[in-house]
Image: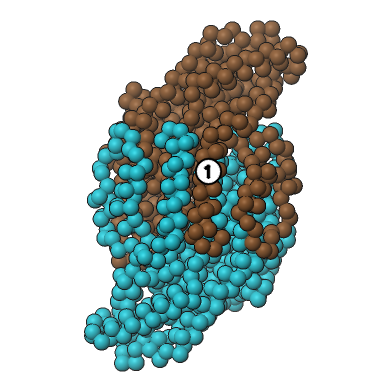
Chain colours: A cyan, B brown
Amino acid sequence: MKTPEEFRAEAHKMADRIADYFQQIEQYPVKSLVKPGEIASRLPDFPPDHPEQMDDIMEDFEEIIMPGITHWQHPGFFAFFPANSSYPSVLAEMLTAALGQQGMIWETSPAAAELEQRVMEWLKTMCGLPADWTGVIQDTASASTLTALLTAREKATGFSVNHDGFDKEKKLRIYCSTETHSSIEKAARIAGFGRKNLVKIAVDDNFAMNPSALRDAITKDLNDGCRPCCVVATIGTTSSTAVDPIAEIGKICREHDIWLHVDAAFAGTALVLNEMRHFADGLELADSYVFNPHKWMFTNFDCSAYFVKDPDLLIRTFEILPEYLKTRTRGQVNDYRDWGVALGRRFRALKLWFVIRNFGVEGIRDKVRKHLDLAQWLAGEINQSPEFELLAPVPFSLVCFRFRPLQISDESAIDNLNEKLLQLLNASGRLYITHTRLHGKYTLRMVTAQTNVERIHVEKAWTLIRATAGELIKSGNTGE
Amino acid sequence: MKTPEEFRAEAHKMADRIADYFQQIEQYPVKSLVKPGEIASRLPDFPPDHPEQMDDIMEDFEEIIMPGITHWQHPGFFAFFPANSSYPSVLAEMLTAALGQQGMIWETSPAAAELEQRVMEWLKTMCGLPADWTGVIQDTASASTLTALLTAREKATGFSVNHDGFDKEKKLRIYCSTETHSSIEKAARIAGFGRKNLVKIAVDDNFAMNPSALRDAITKDLNDGCRPCCVVATIGTTSSTAVDPIAEIGKICREHDIWLHVDAAFAGTALVLNEMRHFADGLELADSYVFNPHKWMFTNFDCSAYFVKDPDLLIRTFEILPEYLKTRTRGQVNDYRDWGVALGRRFRALKLWFVIRNFGVEGIRDKVRKHLDLAQWLAGEINQSPEFELLAPVPFSLVCFRFRPLQISDESAIDNLNEKLLQLLNASGRLYITHTRLHGKYTLRMVTAQTNVERIHVEKAWTLIRATAGELIKSGNTGE
């Protein structure tokens, strides 16, 4: 492919292939059924010396790669949290790829910098976030949380870790609940705090952080001569979408001058609905906040929206200015390379702009409302079924449940049964769900938040779950 | 857009728009000519409530966004290091966007995991890298370098910083040359070493690290009770593509059990050519190595190829295993979330696979060889011109030079003149070059490595540079 006209022909073929994919997506098994090594064994050990035609590459794509794809965009994808795409988002990514922007500083792509600034303002409006916050797009919530911990570290030490390293400091302590996402521990290690200084606070029966346990932990640390540095609270934990009491936690943080980072990676999108904003009560007390449009706002992975109260602290944490990056516009514009870990930055604002405009805010609200209703419907079905039980409240679009047939009472047998059920369901190719543990119980997690999921998909899934569970019991193959 | 058929129609329009873009790209000013705030002022303050048609969005894209695009894919883009795209890479990104994979673990996309494993093997073969290395794709060289420093930190401390934080340790020291990229300092801060513990080693006249100065610095630190932890050596520095003497540095590192990370972010692609591999002599002594296919290997940003000698150390540095990510394939497969900072991962291997196959290894070699020749041609022209001078050797495809008219001898006047020249050239819209400082001199940097750059573009640029310089002198507006 050497000319724009050759590219044009191939791009049209690809447009059709992608449209076909979306049309036929329900015919694929949701979770790839290949075994470890199966794909690799079909790929040559050595790269080709000479050019190969796109038709040949695409033939291999269909035959070798496609069987190894787990279809995140399938409406039967109920696993993890979704990584949702949508039609306008895919169109934007096509354009992003063609423009090949590297938006490390304003000058290398003024449009990328200023569109990012504007769409982050739009997100604030859409979600009712504090008007005085400033937003920036990061790649993932892991990066956003790392960014928060680093800024907290530098604020607490007067920027001395950046300059001198850690060694002169009091022990810096971080707090999160036992249900907090693993990326907090990863960030605490990366930033040099050490996992020992990540204090896990107990949760209540609904898996939300217990604020008096937080207060006790902080008091104890102060008495021990440590420096409480940062609390990470969650709106919508990974296991069960529990909501930590942000207002109470925020009050404690303000009393002790502790950085409050709020992680709403998945559930944050729900704040587009007025009726959901009570979950974020007290959010104005936060110093930083993250939610991922790439999860529930129909915008291709990766796109993580990170907000801070004080952008100067953020920039001061990351800023380095070598000669080859000095520009005449410095100080007048946002050079986003100083707002996070990576120097290079893709033009991620474009897809958010496409999605928000093509859906319209009301269109996004309709989708989210539908997903919440689907979860409530499923929770209702489970509640009415004597052989299934809910294992956590359902505040958003995640339903945590398990099969608990009346004739089995041993907890570890029930665990095994549900693990077996999960495997059979996923092996069917008709849906993909994942698991967690809640109060020690093996728990099935089913998220009704895929871009294109409709009532029919959830109904079919529920029918399959009941049927498969019934067969498991009948076959006696219950894992006991 | 609600149906695959509506998407199909829009995707075909987008395919044409992108092909048109590649056809017409030379008609755009290379560097955007907008002023700060100009784009933002044309974007509404509030998001639309109701859906907008793609035609309307694309109209705004053309009118508002396009003027703010700096055209990284324009063959007149000679700035920074390139962030090259290519036709097969754009096609792959289209597909990547549609599939919407999130390859955090093998199970969430077996094809993404196993194709990544294979193409990283291919890159080793193509570049003659040590056969016992293991590769993984990171987003940027910043992330790769951070990953290296963290692994070095954990190896040096027996994983105690991860667990306990920094405070019991001897001072950990990192070494790099004064010419090393700013991402090393950024990573040293993030990882908690502190910039004070980043020791900048002097360079020789060709801007390469002086190994005896490195040895002295290490000896001094050992005498002072510090723990030398990591040396970062560079093949192709950002300012002038200088090459640190890897073999000598590696020997020193082996003597003292110091981690050696080699940063070849830009120049690493040149190793596809046998005749360039001498620059990497001693590379087998490195513990980790990064080069960016998104710079010079025609693969869309972001795609950074990171290699390690011991993947177990890497995984041990990053691994965390919460219940909701436990899978039955754990241990049999590569779960790449444990190979770097981010949990979530795009399907980046696909574009590398498309590029390597559609170009063929020889096709990539031809392009790289052409770019090297263009730089030699330009350097020759500059050498023959009494009013211009080279300011650094030209080992790869970057030419560092300045205008030095015979009638001006004051160094700061020459600096001002070249700064003025740079501004005029970039304001012409016909090319984009950037600057650095070498031996204190304001230096013009011109990289002849854009995917589609041909001799004609470099000739035109050189003609424009001479003409603009001549006019500057004639007008007397020389910045003195």
Instruction: Indicate whether A469 appears above or below B288.
Output: below
Would residue A192 be visible to someone looking at this image?
no
Residue B311: percent from the left, percent from the top?
33, 48
Please indicate whether residue B327 sits to the left or right of residue A141 in the image.
left
Q: From this view, report whether residue B8 is shown above or below residue B49.
A: above
In the displayed structure image, the side of residue A77 where residue A229 appears, left or right: right
> Which residue position is annotated with label 1?
B16
Q: What residue do we see at 51% from left, 39% from top?
A: B19
Q: Chain of mark 1?
A: B
Residue A141 percent across, percent down from the top left: 53, 58
Q: Quadrant of the N terminus of chain B?
A: bottom right
Q: Nearer the viewer, residue B90 or B212?
A: B90
Classify residue A48 by image quadrant. top left
CA neighbours of label 1 inside 10 A, class few (<14), some (14 to 19), many (20+):
some
In the figure, is residue B429 to the left or right of B475?
left
The residue nearer to you, when weighing B356 against B12, is: B12
Q: Find residue A369 and report its horizontal and vertical position in percent.
A: 59, 73
